[in-house]
Amino acid sequence: MKFILLAISIFFYLNCCSQNISGYIYDPEGNPLEFASVVIDSSSLGAATNSKGFYEFKNVGPGRHVISVSYLGYASQNKTVKVQGEKNTICNFNLARTSIISDPIIVRANRDEAGLVAVPARITMLPAKKIEQSAGTNISDVLGSIAGVDVKDDNGIYSSQTVVSLRGLGGDNQSGTLVLLDGNPVNKSDAGSVNWNMFEKDNIEKIEVVKGPGSVLFGNNAMGGIINIITKKPVKKLSLNTNLFYGTYNTFGGKISAMGRTDNSLFYWKMNAGFKKSDGYINTPDYIIKENDTIVVPVFLDEWNASITAGFQPTERSLVEISFNVYDDQRGRGVKIFEESGANSEHDTYYTLGKYRGKLKSTSVYLNIYNYHEDYNRLNEYYSMSEYKLYEVNSKRDDSGLKLWFESPFKKIFNLTYGAEIKAGSVDGADVYYSSTDVVTNKGKIELYGGFFQVKSKIIQNKLFLVSGIRYDLSRFHDALFSIENPSYSIEYLADYQFFDIPVETYGGFSPKFSLEYYLNDNLNGYASVGKGFRAPILEDLCRTGRKKIGFKIANPDLSSEYIMNYETGFNYSKKRIKTGVSVYFMSGKDFMYYLSTGDSVNLGYTIAPVFKMSNISKVEVKGLELEAEYSLPENFSVYANYTYNQSVIKEFVKTESGVDTDLSGKFLTDIPDHKYSFGANYKHKWISASISAKYTGTRWVNETNTIDYNYLRSAKYPAYTNYNFKIWKNIKELTLTFSIDNILNTIYTDSNGYRCPGRFMLFEAKYKFNK
């Protein structure tokens, strides 16, 4: 009882004596630094500066506290302050520019692996405020405004297979770019795809985009680069956000999120939930509607998501956290004959993540464990030679992994990162025909094992920095089959592509990297990097045969891994309100995976389709240039512009199929724009704020032979197009009213699947925030 009374007395004493710590963060010229990370090491408090560079901590207990400030591209600083009596404490910082190499950023209120991607490379960081203020409905819209980022989401919120790729390594395939959610991969082993509809803009703290191979620390898929999405963490005792919206095509929905921390900050929690519905639009081109007007209907969407996170943080340098996310959607595919919802696709997704952060003397310990399960269903109904066809694709996809790594300082000038990880993926799929007796089954499993070691060093203090490392990956493919049960005459053509009991396939390789960065002065720095990337095949290419947008593709269980060497250099210039950056890169790919025609064709009933197979090309070369510039005025106005040039060419081609009669040497890779540029402006005012952006996407080759497509487009290239987006919002205390327009000029174009974009899309939102 005495102990309880003593504890209560101490609690009330500390609250009575608690004061505020506040201050401003500036660059060397005295300009405020927005979004700088500020931490009190002796507590769980963390904050980010506003547009004036101001931060504040309220109700800080008496005693000595260490204030730590970090900002990408600037040297971190620590200051010790003493809180006593009733006097508030002021602590200002002037940060000096330095290498983008930094120690891992450990912020109790937002503790993530940001430092793990802080290497000499072209890095773009989008903080929460920039994401919220951007003129774009989806996260993919925001990413599309970054140089070197190519986005395929031409159907907007109705897209079920959005692709965000970096530096020409993707086209319509997500597997060449690694996507992380709080440091954990979300690319599926089956198709390499990412469900971008799972990510809510309002739930994101920041996005880090690292361009160029990142295989040393992250392994498979990080060929073109890494996109790390970091979610918001609780900072205050209680925060509540609600959001209601309504828009074009009778689109409506709502979101709610709540998060908080206990008074002693030992425990924290977070919950999110939301839904979205829309009647949709006709995505079928006009020339097809004329022939099939009775079965063409609007696409639609019906989705909901929820997540919960709980964390325990007993000490400053340790925490345990677990989170669970669930996502469910149904999206129409624009055709309806007899089924109530017509042709449609569904994703039932469950994502569980556990993490541990700790410290053993001077060594930091990191552990991530995750499990990703998705039930994918796609219902297809159509007429084939006047005969009705109905079948459903059921695919169970599982991915799980464990990653353990350590960071240790060595002799003051070195920082060592080393560890290992294991990933396992599987698919168990079946095409079940209801209009016949057929059942088509595909199965496969793949595991990946990796170990890595990296050294960061300061060769010349605040001048010359080095990052070098090496990784070894080994992947194992097994238990694969493709079979047909009770085949009918309509799919007899699949019988020739069956396989069973294939031997275990293993792929392995080393991925080294060497990077240097030199600072000429506080305003100008340059970097150079050489690295190798590794990517194992995806299960869909290894063990699934079926329809594809290109025609008909067959499985290739003999497919091997691809490797790519990246040579890159660039510089950054920053002074007062101007920031510029230039990067030039050259990549040479070996055994590059690419769809090639076998020279055969199959009768699908409604068309004669060419047969393709994912194959390893002897050599591919990618050349590129990225230019970026940003200009800002104090507090209220900023503009940006960037340009990307990319040339992706098949350098050497060796025929592996006797049916292939075309030498593809010198041909350009498909679905990759040669030119891309973006520009935009943001204006903030106490009465009203606005942002506008434009994105130009250049022409892209339609097929691998770079010849005219006579079936659909009657062109060798997809036409170039420009999208303009606009957003305006008004803050009324805790209430924010927003009106946005995507595709202002209502530009209509078709995507690589032959579907029309939704055109102009308008949305009105009302948001309410409560903080305690």
Image: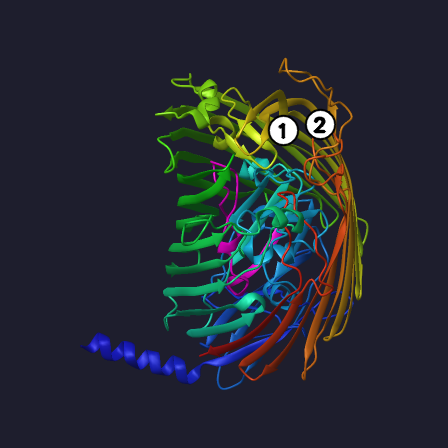
Residue displayed at 67% across by 40% down: 212
Q: Nearer the viewer, residue 228 or 735?
A: 735
For the residue marked with disc 2, what is the amino acid?
A: Val
In this rendering, position of residue 246 left or right of residue 576: left
The residue sitting at 37% across, 82% down in the picture is 13
Which residue is labeled 2 in the image?
620
Circle 2 or circle 1, nearest the eye: 1
Which quadrant would the C terminus be assigned to in this image? bottom left
Look at 50% across and 73% down and name the residue there: 244
Q: Position of residue 409 (x, y in %)?
A: 55, 44
Would residue 641 appear left or right of 690 to someone viewing this image? right
Q: Secondary structure at mark 2?
A: strand
The answer to whether residue 368 is visible is yes
Relative image position of residue 72 (x, y in whole percent): 65, 56
Whole-percent x and y of residue 293? 57, 51
Q: Which residue is mark 1?
A: 594
Who comes first in sequence, dot 2 or dot 1? Answer: 1
Q: Is residue 192 magenta?
A: yes
Say if mark 2 contacts mark 1, CB within 8 Å. Answer: yes
Q: Is residue 352 magenta?
A: no
How is the structure coloured here? Answer: rainbow
Q: Which residues are magenta?
A: 181-208
Q: Vertical placement of 256 versus 321: above or below?
A: below
Say which mark, if any, is on residue 419: none
Look at the image and tell me whether residue 109 can be seen: no
